[in-house]
Image: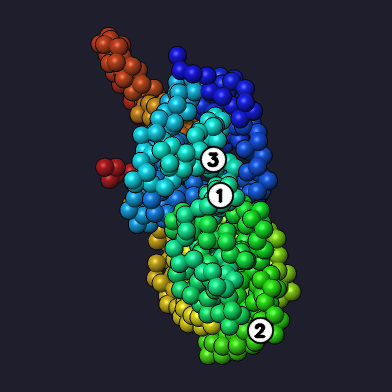
Amino acid sequence: MAERLPTLDGSSDVPDTSGESGGAQGVGCHGDARDAARAAGDNEALKALMEDYPLGPHEQPQGMCPAFGSLRVGLRMRRTATVLSGSACCVYGLTFTSHFYGARRTVGYVPFNSESLVTGALYEDIKQAMVDLADPEDYDAIVMTNLCIPTASGVPLDMLPKEINGVRIVGIDVPGFGVPTHAEAKDVLSGAVLKRARLEAEAGPVARPKNLVEDRPTVSLLGELFPADPMGIAALIEPMGMALGPVVPVREWRELYAALDSEVCAAIHPHYVRAAAEFKKAGRAVVGSGPVGVEGTAAWLKSIGAAAGIPADTTGAAVDRATKMIAGAIASAPLEGRIQVSGYEGSELLVARVMIEAGADVPYVGTALPKSEWSQADFEWLEAHGTHVQFRASLEQDIEAFKETKPDLVIGTTPVVQEAKENGVPGLYFTNLVSARPIFGPAGAGSLAPVLMGAMKGRERLGQMKSFFAGVGTGHAAGYGWTEVPEKKLSAKERNARARGGKATTGKGKHSELAVGKEHEGAKAPGEEAGVARDTSASIRTKDRIRQSAAAKGSAKRAEKATEAETEAGKATEAEKPEPATAGGAD
Ligand code: SF4
């Protein structure tokens, strides 16, 4: 029998994950997994997740699987292997999305089953996978990720060796029930690798980072940025005698040391709370917001200068230079119209600031991320400019805002954009069309307006398309291949009743067989046709039934009897026929 699995509190009790006592086995996507994790004794890890990533109104991810965020961060690091443990369907979806995004790296997988969860063999399997993979020729680090079920079951990745053959082992839990967005999962891994790098640097000399800047103070940036943005920011701080450090998430392990070596960390994306905490532990100042628009850039440069100890007049000169350029860029590309912004990237508030400074009316900004101290300045600025900022916004809130504020353009996630377009309002997908262009400094001020104005001009064309396709793909015709009103699927009992002529067997209740049969034949309800002799057709159906029943039972005698009865009923019907109104020409 496999060794008993140690739990996080150090005891050797294995949580019951069989499902019989409410363990993790059998939990659905997120549903009761949080409770299962608590039951499994994984309170400390879950408590930390709850504190760092507070839940919103929906309590479950409304976007992609959160683990995609950490997976993406691991896959972009050179000489880093990434391994997942979770349900096969989750791993399939995650690897599929990774390849879709062009990661071009292999993702390792440690599968489990009920037995390996219950006995603790999964932990041993994971440990063995680390041993098999830890080749220092190929890797600096292996990132081992617990998905929902192993996290809920309390598989203790922090018990793994910190290093095997000189290869670092970094274990993280990224459950959908504890990390509400994939953006925050990027922070889970970024925070974990920064922590390891910080502890290494504190313990003694570490490998020298490439391109380490030593002659000037540097600023590290937190958040996945459009590639041109770091260059633009570097140009803004250059007159202050400062240089740019690495962007976290980093591209290789040694960059972590360089990042921690920076004087200032700029939390451009305000939800990297664990990463920011590591910078603080390393004694670095952390500055929120970002250099967006004239006002945002001036405030940000002053904060950076103050944090790095740059003389005020030097900073002031850099501010004057930057704000002149940005004001010129805004004047050359003004923006008009009402725009709604929503997304899950972390830059929603910054994007809204750029738009407002360029002249747009932005009544609502929804972000799937929570409020943090790094977004406070942007929040206050937007509120002061009449914008409602919804942190941890749900899809429903974004759509409700769209209905209320009636924007000319919607920038949002796929379902929000779809809602807008269905209503004839132009929409742009935040991730593909806004995050994929610069937003900082003069480049940001000048690049957004042409795209957004172009999209708003498309409203008339969208209206034409809407009227041309009116009714297509909506209501009963929604989805591929549906053109007719879908028919109600009959149960076997109902089909049987229908075959027998729709005669009710119960005779009562709205779901009686008669009601079903009539509804589908377009027949009228009993008694609706006043004056029609009810027993004629009914008696024929009765005989039909007798005949069918007799045939089914192989009783020729009863079938004959039914035929005789039918003949008699026919005679009776003839006798009851009223006299024709006029004589002759009866045929
Ligand atoms: S790992 Fe969790 S959140 Fe991700 S797809 Fe699987 S069940 Fe859903």
Front label number (3 vs 2): 2
The N terminus lies in which quarter of the figure?
top left
Q: Nearer the viewer, mark 1 or mark 2?
A: 1
Ligand 1 within 8 A of label 2's CB? no
Quarter of the image where one finds residue 60: top right
Q: What residue do we see at 44% from left, 63% from top?
A: 210
Please identify the quarter of the rendering in which residue 394 is found: bottom right
According to the image, label 3 marks what residue? Answer: 173
Instruction: Return the residue at label 2.
Output: 314
The residue type indicated by label 2 comes to Thr
- The numbered disc on residue 348 is none
Which circle's residue, 1 or 3, is located before the other in the chain? 3
Q: Secondary structure at mark 2?
A: helix
| Residue type indicated by callout 1 | Gly
Q: Are marks 3 and 2 in contact (CB under 8 Å)?
A: no
Rate crowding at label 1 as few (under 14), some (14 to 19) or many (20 or more) other CA atoms within 10 Å: few
Position above or below: 554 against 148: above
- Judging depth in this view, the residue of 246 and 341 nearest the camera is 246
Q: Position of residue 70 (x, y in %)?
A: 49, 49
Name the amino acid type tagged 3.
Asp
At 49% from the left and 34% from the top, the residue drawn is 161
Foreground residue among 34 and 396: 34
How much space separates mark 3 and mark 2, taking CA atoms? 45 Å
Q: Nearer the viewer, residue 276 or 165?
A: 165
In the rendered image, which residue does mark 1 sit on? 204
